[in-house]
Amino acid sequence: MSAETDLKAAKVANASGITPESLRSTLAEKLEAQHVAIEDISGGCGQAFEAVIVSPLFLQKTSLARHRLVNSVLKTEIAAIHAWTPKCFAPDEWARKQAQEKATLPEGV
């Protein structure tokens, strides 16, 4: 990106007030999340985020119900950004996923 583009992106991010940390904090608090990872995929302008959220509140809920729960918690924030992509896991699902990923890594990594 050029310096001008970087400056514009920073202004947009500052105007919305939405940061990966503010999203993480809200999700951790309101969803009792055990793990929250937020990535700004907008190139720095703060308008597109991906998230991995692990919460016991997701137990016994469908994927749609999980997304609705997350979206209800972040209703104001989602209205202020361009794109939001959450990946929601119950703690047991997350543990299995982590174990599976670890098992597929080459030795020594």
Image: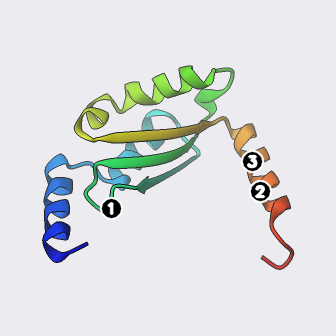
Whether the residues at callouts 2 and 3 have beta carbons within 8 Å, the answer is: yes
Report the disc number at residue 101: 2
Tag 3 secondary structure: helix
Marks 1 and 3 sit apart, C-alpha to C-alpha, by: 28 Å
Position of residue 88 relative to residue 46, above or below, is above
Residue under pointer 1: 43
Disc on the earlier residue, 1 or 2: 1
User: Which quadrant would residue 41 be assigned to in this image?
Assistant: bottom left
Q: What is the three-letter code of the residue carrying label 2?
A: Glu
Residue sitting nearer the eye, 84 or 30: 84
**Compared with residue 99, is residue 33 higher up or lower down, i.e. above or below?**
above
- The colour scheme used to paint the residues is rainbow
* Type of amino acid under label 1: Gly
Marks 1 and 3, the one that precedes in the sequence: 1
Residue 42, by quadrant, is bottom left
- Residue 104, located in which quarter of the rendered image? bottom right
User: Around disc 2, counting alpha carbons within 10 Å, would you say few (fewer than 14), some (14 to 19), or many (20 or more)?
Assistant: few
Give the structural element (helix, strand or loop) at label 2. helix
> Who's the residue at 39% across and 48% down the image?
49
- Badge 1: few (under 14), some or many (20 or more) residues near its Cα, within 10 Å? few
Q: Residue at x 16, y 54 (%)?
A: 12
Task: Please state, as top left, top right, bottom left or bottom right, where the N terminus lies in the image.
Answer: bottom left
Could you tell me residue 57's position as x and y percent? 59, 28
Task: Determine the CA span between mark 2 and mark 3.
Answer: 6 Å
Q: Nearer the viewer, mark 1 or mark 3?
A: 1
**What numbered label is drawn on residue 97?**
3
In depth, the one of 35 and 80 nearer the eye is: 80
Residue 76 percent location from the top left of the image = 26, 31
Q: Residue at x 21, y 55 (%)?
A: 13
